Image (cartoon, rainbow, N blue to C red):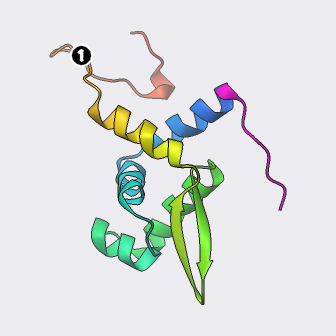
Amino acid sequence: MLTTIATDIDALTRFGRALADPIRCRLLIALNEAPAHPADLADALGISRTRLSNHLACLRDCGLVVAVPVGRRVRYELADARLGHALDHLHNAVLAVEADRTCVDAEKGCCP
């Protein structure tokens, strides 16, 4: 398996793609607390193992998590400890949100 280092923009794009889904956000927060096995993650998040598997595949493809073999099982963890620091900062960020505005979908564009 060939591993490459993502450029700055590519890394931010991958991080943003991962954070665009609430389940993936919850997964990243859970893995920031501690590495975990898929069955435990599915139970903790209250989702099916199939759905969890799809989200973990996305996070792996984005380069944010890695699968670590532990005997016959696989444990997931953040690919880099600095991702945990970034998640902590994002989680604690204060957003300047106008009460009458909503965040638009990427397909619709940024501006009305």
Q: Is residue 86 left or right of residue 9?
A: left
Q: Nearer the viewer, residue 57 or 106?
A: 57
Q: Which picture quadrant has residue 90?
A: top left
Q: Is residue 51 above or below residue 18?
A: below
The residue beneath circle 1 is 101
Identity of the amino acid at label 1?
Arg
Q: Position of residue 15 (x, y in %)?
A: 53, 38
Taking the magenta stretch, the answer to whether it contains residue 5 is yes
Q: Is residue 92 left or right of residue 51?
A: left
**Which element is circle 1 on?**
loop
Q: Is residue 48 left or right of residue 57?
A: left
Q: Which of the image's four quarters has the N terminus?
A: bottom right
Q: Look at the image and tell me whether residue 60 can be seen.
A: yes
Q: Position of residue 84 (x, y in %)?
A: 44, 46
- Quadrant containing the C terminus in the rendered view: top left
Q: Position of residue 18 (x, y in %)?
A: 50, 44
Magenta residues (range): 1-8
